[in-house]
Protein backbone atom coordinates (compact mmCIF):
# COMPACT_ATOMS: atom_id res chain seq x y z
CA UNK A 1 0.00 0.00 0.00
CA UNK A 2 1.30 3.46 -0.89
CA UNK A 3 2.94 5.32 1.97
CA UNK A 4 0.66 8.35 1.67
CA UNK A 5 -2.41 6.10 2.08
CA UNK A 6 -0.97 4.33 5.15
CA UNK A 7 0.00 7.58 6.89
CA UNK A 8 -3.35 9.11 6.18
CA UNK A 9 -5.45 6.14 7.28
CA UNK A 10 -3.42 5.76 10.51
CA UNK A 11 -4.16 9.39 11.34
CA UNK A 12 -7.86 9.00 10.51
CA UNK A 13 -8.11 5.75 12.47
CA UNK A 14 -6.81 7.60 15.56
CA UNK A 15 -9.19 10.48 14.83
CA UNK A 16 -12.21 8.13 14.97
CA UNK A 17 -10.93 6.52 18.19
CA UNK A 18 -10.48 9.89 19.91
CA UNK A 19 -13.48 11.75 18.47
CA UNK A 20 -16.14 12.73 20.97
CA UNK A 21 -18.68 12.88 18.13
CA UNK A 22 -18.09 9.28 17.04
CA UNK A 23 -18.20 7.92 20.59
CA UNK A 24 -21.40 9.90 21.32
CA UNK A 25 -22.95 8.41 18.15
CA UNK A 26 -21.68 4.92 19.03
CA UNK A 27 -19.38 4.56 16.04
CA UNK A 28 -16.35 2.29 16.28
CA UNK A 29 -13.52 1.16 14.05
CA UNK A 30 -11.03 -1.72 14.43
CA UNK A 31 -8.09 -3.01 12.44
CA UNK A 32 -8.55 -6.26 10.55
CA UNK A 33 -4.93 -6.44 9.42
CA UNK A 34 -1.83 -4.64 10.64
CA UNK A 35 -1.12 -2.80 7.40
CA UNK A 36 -4.33 -0.71 7.53
CA UNK A 37 -5.74 -1.98 4.22
CA UNK A 38 -8.83 -3.45 5.85
CA UNK A 39 -10.83 -2.13 8.77
CA UNK A 40 -14.00 -3.20 10.50
CA UNK A 41 -16.45 -0.46 11.36
CA UNK A 42 -19.49 -0.54 13.57
CA UNK A 43 -22.32 1.96 13.69
CA UNK A 44 -25.33 2.08 15.98
CA UNK A 45 -28.79 2.38 14.47
CA UNK A 46 -29.90 6.01 14.88
CA UNK A 47 -32.64 6.89 17.39
CA UNK A 48 -36.24 7.15 16.14
CA UNK A 49 -35.57 4.86 13.17
CA UNK A 50 -36.41 1.16 12.65
CA UNK A 51 -32.66 0.51 13.14
CA UNK A 52 -32.54 1.91 16.69
CA UNK A 53 -30.87 -0.45 19.14
CA UNK A 54 -29.10 -2.39 16.38
CA UNK A 55 -25.31 -2.64 15.90
CA UNK A 56 -24.22 -2.74 12.26
CA UNK A 57 -20.86 -4.19 11.22
CA UNK A 58 -19.12 -2.73 8.18
CA UNK A 59 -16.28 -4.02 6.01
CA UNK A 60 -13.98 -1.15 5.02
CA UNK A 61 -11.29 -1.74 2.40
CA UNK A 62 -8.76 1.03 1.81
CA UNK A 63 -7.51 1.30 -1.79
CA UNK A 64 -3.86 2.04 -2.61
CA UNK A 65 -5.02 5.29 -4.17
CA UNK A 66 -6.58 6.54 -0.91
CA UNK A 67 -7.38 9.39 -0.17
CA UNK A 68 -7.85 10.21 -3.88
CA UNK A 69 -10.35 7.37 -4.19
CA UNK A 70 -12.97 6.42 -1.61
CA UNK A 71 -12.74 3.40 0.65
CA UNK A 72 -14.82 0.40 -0.41
CA UNK A 73 -17.46 -0.09 2.25
CA UNK A 74 -20.25 -2.62 2.62
CA UNK A 75 -22.57 -3.75 5.40
CA UNK A 76 -21.66 -7.16 6.84
CA UNK A 77 -24.75 -7.10 9.05
CA UNK A 78 -27.90 -7.77 7.00
CA UNK A 79 -30.15 -4.72 6.80
CA UNK A 80 -33.47 -3.78 5.14
CA UNK A 81 -32.84 -0.34 3.62
CA UNK A 82 -33.50 1.13 0.14
CA UNK A 83 -29.87 2.24 -0.34
CA UNK A 84 -28.20 -0.94 0.91
CA UNK A 85 -28.41 -4.33 -0.80
CA UNK A 86 -30.30 -6.81 1.38
CA UNK A 87 -28.24 -9.55 -0.30
CA UNK A 88 -24.64 -8.25 -0.55
CA UNK A 89 -24.55 -5.24 1.78
CA UNK A 90 -23.42 -2.98 -1.09
CA UNK A 91 -24.16 0.70 -0.43
CA UNK A 92 -25.49 3.39 -2.73
CA UNK A 93 -24.11 6.64 -1.31
CA UNK A 94 -22.74 9.45 -3.48
CA UNK A 95 -19.64 10.12 -1.31
CA UNK A 96 -18.55 6.51 -1.77
CA UNK A 97 -18.74 6.99 -5.52
CA UNK A 98 -18.52 10.15 -7.66
CA UNK A 99 -18.95 12.72 -4.87
CA UNK A 100 -15.86 11.60 -2.95
CA UNK A 101 -13.30 14.29 -2.15
CA UNK A 102 -9.79 13.75 -0.80
CA UNK A 103 -10.62 16.03 2.14
CA UNK A 104 -13.17 13.48 3.40
CA UNK A 105 -12.13 11.07 6.12
CA UNK A 106 -13.04 7.77 7.69
CA UNK A 107 -15.00 9.71 10.33
CA UNK A 108 -17.00 11.49 7.56
CA UNK A 109 -17.81 8.15 5.92
CA UNK A 110 -19.00 6.49 9.14
CA UNK A 111 -21.11 9.47 10.19
CA UNK A 112 -22.59 9.70 6.66
CA UNK A 113 -23.56 6.02 6.73
CA UNK A 114 -25.26 6.48 10.08
CA UNK A 115 -27.10 9.51 8.67
CA UNK A 116 -28.16 7.41 5.64
CA UNK A 117 -29.92 5.00 8.01
CA UNK A 118 -31.98 7.92 9.29
CA UNK A 119 -32.67 9.46 5.85
CA UNK A 120 -33.09 6.94 3.04
CA UNK A 121 -33.01 8.03 -0.62
CA UNK A 122 -35.60 5.70 -2.22
CA UNK A 123 -35.30 7.41 -5.62
CA UNK A 124 -31.65 6.34 -5.88
CA UNK A 125 -31.97 2.77 -4.59
CA UNK A 126 -29.44 -0.03 -4.25
CA UNK A 127 -32.24 -2.49 -3.53
CA UNK A 128 -35.33 -1.96 -5.74
CA UNK A 129 -37.58 -4.35 -3.78
CA UNK A 130 -36.90 -2.50 -0.52
CA UNK A 131 -37.26 0.93 -2.16
CA UNK A 132 -40.58 -0.10 -3.66
CA UNK A 133 -41.89 -1.24 -0.27
CA UNK A 134 -40.56 1.99 1.33
CA UNK A 135 -42.56 4.08 -1.15
CA UNK A 136 -45.71 1.92 -1.51
CA UNK A 137 -46.19 0.76 2.07
CA UNK A 138 -44.14 2.82 4.59
CA UNK A 139 -45.63 1.08 7.64
CA UNK A 140 -44.77 -2.39 6.33
CA UNK A 141 -41.29 -1.12 5.44
CA UNK A 142 -40.76 0.11 9.04
CA UNK A 143 -41.97 -3.19 10.52
CA UNK A 144 -39.78 -5.19 8.13
CA UNK A 145 -36.70 -3.03 8.79
CA UNK A 146 -37.33 -3.35 12.54
CA UNK A 147 -37.61 -7.12 12.27
CA UNK A 148 -34.31 -7.33 10.32
CA UNK A 149 -32.72 -5.08 12.96
CA UNK A 150 -33.94 -7.43 15.66
CA UNK A 151 -32.86 -10.65 13.92
CA UNK A 152 -29.51 -9.53 12.48
CA UNK A 153 -28.37 -6.50 14.51
CA UNK A 154 -29.62 -7.32 17.99
CA UNK A 155 -32.22 -4.52 18.22
CA UNK A 156 -34.89 -5.18 20.85
CA UNK A 157 -38.22 -4.36 19.14
CA UNK A 158 -39.90 -6.70 16.70
CA UNK A 159 -43.33 -7.60 15.31
CA UNK A 160 -44.94 -10.69 16.90
CA UNK A 161 -47.11 -11.14 13.79
CA UNK A 162 -44.06 -11.25 11.48
CA UNK A 163 -42.21 -13.52 13.90
CA UNK A 164 -45.13 -16.00 13.83
CA UNK A 165 -45.03 -16.09 10.03
CA UNK A 166 -41.27 -16.75 10.08
CA UNK A 167 -41.71 -19.56 12.63
CA UNK A 168 -44.51 -21.11 10.55
CA UNK A 169 -42.33 -21.36 7.42
CA UNK A 170 -39.26 -22.48 9.41
CA UNK A 171 -41.39 -25.30 10.85
CA UNK A 172 -41.88 -26.47 7.24
CA UNK A 173 -38.11 -27.00 7.03
CA UNK A 174 -37.02 -23.83 5.22
CA UNK A 175 -33.83 -21.97 6.20
CA UNK A 176 -34.58 -18.99 8.50
CA UNK A 177 -32.60 -16.43 6.44
CA UNK A 178 -34.29 -17.58 3.22
CA UNK A 179 -37.69 -17.36 4.95
CA UNK A 180 -37.04 -13.79 6.16
CA UNK A 181 -35.93 -12.68 2.68
CA UNK A 182 -38.91 -14.36 0.99
CA UNK A 183 -41.50 -12.91 3.39
CA UNK A 184 -39.89 -9.45 3.33
CA UNK A 185 -39.84 -9.30 -0.47
CA UNK A 186 -43.37 -10.74 -0.81
CA UNK A 187 -45.09 -8.23 1.53
CA UNK A 188 -45.34 -10.80 4.35
CA UNK A 189 -47.78 -12.95 2.39
CA UNK A 190 -47.12 -16.54 3.53
CA UNK A 191 -48.53 -18.15 0.38
CA UNK A 192 -46.46 -16.20 -2.18
CA UNK A 193 -43.39 -16.44 0.06
CA UNK A 194 -43.84 -20.24 0.18
CA UNK A 195 -44.07 -20.37 -3.62
CA UNK A 196 -40.87 -18.35 -3.87
CA UNK A 197 -39.08 -20.65 -1.43
CA UNK A 198 -40.26 -23.76 -3.29
CA UNK A 199 -39.11 -22.34 -6.65
CA UNK A 200 -35.52 -21.79 -5.40
Image (cartoon, rainbow, N blue to C red):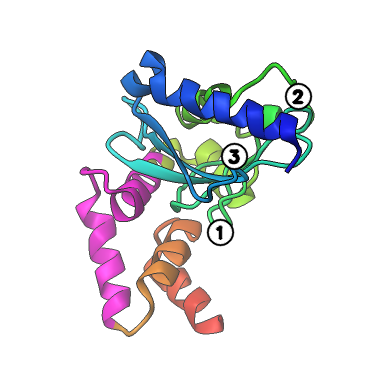
Image quarter (top left, top right, bottom left or bottom right) of the C terminus:
bottom right
Asked whether residue 150 is drawn in magenta, I would say yes
Q: Which residue is mark 1?
A: 87
> Which labelled disc corresponds to residue 99?
2
Are there few (<14), some (14-19), or many (20+) residues within 10 Å of tag 2?
few
> First in sequence: mark 1 or mark 2?
1
Circle 1 crowding by C-alpha within 10 Å: few under 14, some 14–19, many from 20: few
Q: Which of 99/92 is in front? A: 99
Marks 2 and 3 in Cβ contact (< 8 Å): no
**Depth check: 165 or 106 in front?**
106
Count residues near mark 3 (Cα–Cα under 10 Å), then give few for <14, some for 14-19, many for 20+.
Answer: many
Corner quadrant of residue 7: top right
Residue at x 53%, y 50% (from the top left corner) = 33
Image point (47%, 66%), residue name: 182
- Residue 175 percent across, percent down from the top left: 38, 77
Mark carried by residue 34: none
Residue 181 x %, y %: 46, 63
Q: Position of residue 66 (x, y in %)?
A: 73, 33
Q: Marks 1 and 2, Cα distance to the nearest angstrom?
A: 25 Å
Residue 157 appears anywhere in the view: yes
Marks 1, 2: nearer the viewer:
2
Give the residues in magenta: 142-171
Task: Decide: is 137 above or below 89.
Answer: above
Tell me which residue sits at (74%, 21%) in the image: 102
Secondary element at image label 2: loop
* Residue 145 vs residue 108, the one in the foreground: 108
x and y, in percent, of residue 60 in the image: 57, 43
**For numbered disc 3, what is the local secondary structure?**
loop
Q: Are marks 1 and 2 in contact (CB under 8 Å)?
A: no
User: Magenta includes 161?
Assistant: yes
Instruction: Please tell me which of labels 2 and 3 falls first in the chain.
Output: 3
Residue annotated with mark 3: 83
Amino acid sequence: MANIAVQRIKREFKEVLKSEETSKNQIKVDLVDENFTELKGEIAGPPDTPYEGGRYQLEIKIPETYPFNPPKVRFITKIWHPNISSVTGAICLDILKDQWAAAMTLRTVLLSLQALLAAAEPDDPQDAVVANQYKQNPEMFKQTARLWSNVYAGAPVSSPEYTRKIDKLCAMGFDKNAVIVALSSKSWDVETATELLLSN
